[in-house]
Amino acid sequence: MGYGGTRKYVVSIVIGLSLIGAACAPPGAPGAPGAGQQSSGPIKVGFLAPTTGTSAASGNDMINGWKLYWKNNGGTLNGREVQTIYEDTGGDVNTALTKARQFVEQQQVDMIVGPLFANEGLAVADYLKTTGTPGFYPIVSADDLTQRQRVANVIRVAGWTSSQPHHPFGEWAYDQGYRKVLTVCSDYAFGQEVCGGFLRTFAGERGGEVVKQLWDPVGTPDFSSYLSQIPGSGMDMVFALQVGADSVRFVKQWSDFGYKDRIPLLGGEVLLDQSLLRSMGPEAEGLISVGHWAEGRPAQETQDFDNTYLTEYNQLPSYYAAACYSAGEWIAQGVQKVNGNTSDRQKFLDSVRGIELDTPLGHLKLDDYGNPVATIYVRRVERRSDGKLWNVPIQTFEGVSQFWSFGPDKFLKQPVYSRDFQGLPDQLKALGVQ
């Protein structure tokens, strides 16, 4: 995807803790103090998000969540003014990389937060590896970013891997009595990783049967050719993962086909995200999905955030907003632990890695690979008394690792999930990792 037009603006905010002051180390020296950086003066944060194009709503939610954290928590960190510079990537990998270079080489930011898409995140991470600049990724969920291609100075604060919530979801589905699944998922890396995570446990571990896998291109306007293959397939449940406007179209067409009250549908993390529920109606009510964010969670941290966000923006927060809000809290605590002195990047990054905190998302801590161990929610879409739709947890899995119950040694023997590897029994047997 590539969109024209960029927009830049600076927000200076003062937060009563301490954030960042070092980023541009010599290439290849991730742990060294940042060249040209200091431990006093303003803290510069480069924030990458799409604010134009088809993913602009998600990008704006990212920015809104980030800004709200700083608005709620003062204006400086250890006396240092926090300046966030926002750049629009348009969802384009080349634009994201260009903007990241400008942040580091021209504006000498102390860290980068964002972007949104996996291809953007992997490209920016490769660049940050050469400069040592701290990168914090609350949204990019590409599995390998914190697995086979991890970068020491890039940490997925308040983030997730694409397959992470779907490992427990596959087991949950089997425990509900489902035995035969048909999958309909977006045909790119994210959709393939999500689907693979679900099938790795539903089929690979529990022995459920995969009767058919359907892959739809991103931007599919009409799902009838896929939906028409469901009856007569022998399935007893459908697992689906679409993104953006595709999700809205898929759920509406699912209902129009008369499937809503006839065929069980289980959705991957973003199929029914709050950013999309805003554009849905009765067709979404009662549908079940999984995720590491549930805006209907009754915990105080979540409800306080919901209410504050609703007051500020007149809408309920999506996962994009919740993750970026929580990332702000995580990073601020990391800086506070080094008393506002982030010129020693290694010490700062180590302080971030050691944090555990209770956030609107739930309890979070990092594993040894830089990915959160998180709470995962099986969620049902319900209508609030004010008429808004939201996701309410019906089952919770605490302390879910990106490696689920397999452990890193066993898990990393398998390739990253793709169309060619979906974690099915015959595939696992061929690899010798069953």
Image (cartoon, grey):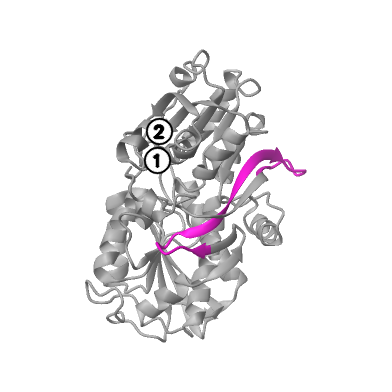
The answer to whether the residue labelled 1 contacts the one labelled 2, judged by CB atoms less than 8 Å apart, is yes
1 or 2: tag closer to the N-terminus: 2
Q: Residue at x 36, y 31 (%)?
A: 426
Q: Residue 425 carries which label?
A: 2
Q: Quick check: 289 left or right of 87? A: right
**Quarter of the rendering occupied by the C terminus:** top left
Q: What stretch is highlighted in magenta?
A: 365-392
Residue 373 is inside the magenta segment: yes
Give the residue type at disc 2: Pro
Secondary structure beneath dot 2 equals helix
Q: Residue 50 carries which label?
A: none
Residue 374 is inside the magenta segment: yes
Q: Which residue lies furthest to the top in this view?
A: 232
Query: From mark 1 to mark 2, how far is it between C-alphas?
Result: 8 Å
Q: Which residue is drawn at 32% across and 44% down?
A: 415
Secondary structure beneath dot 1 equals loop
Secondary structure that dominates the magenta span: strand
Give the residue type at disc 1: Gln
Q: Residue at x 44, y 26 (%)?
A: 221
Residue 120 in sight here: yes
Q: Name the residue under label 1.
A: 434
- Pointer 2 local density, CA inside 10 Å: few below 14, some 14–19, many at least 20: many
- Pointer 1 local density, CA inside 10 Å: few below 14, some 14–19, many at least 20: some
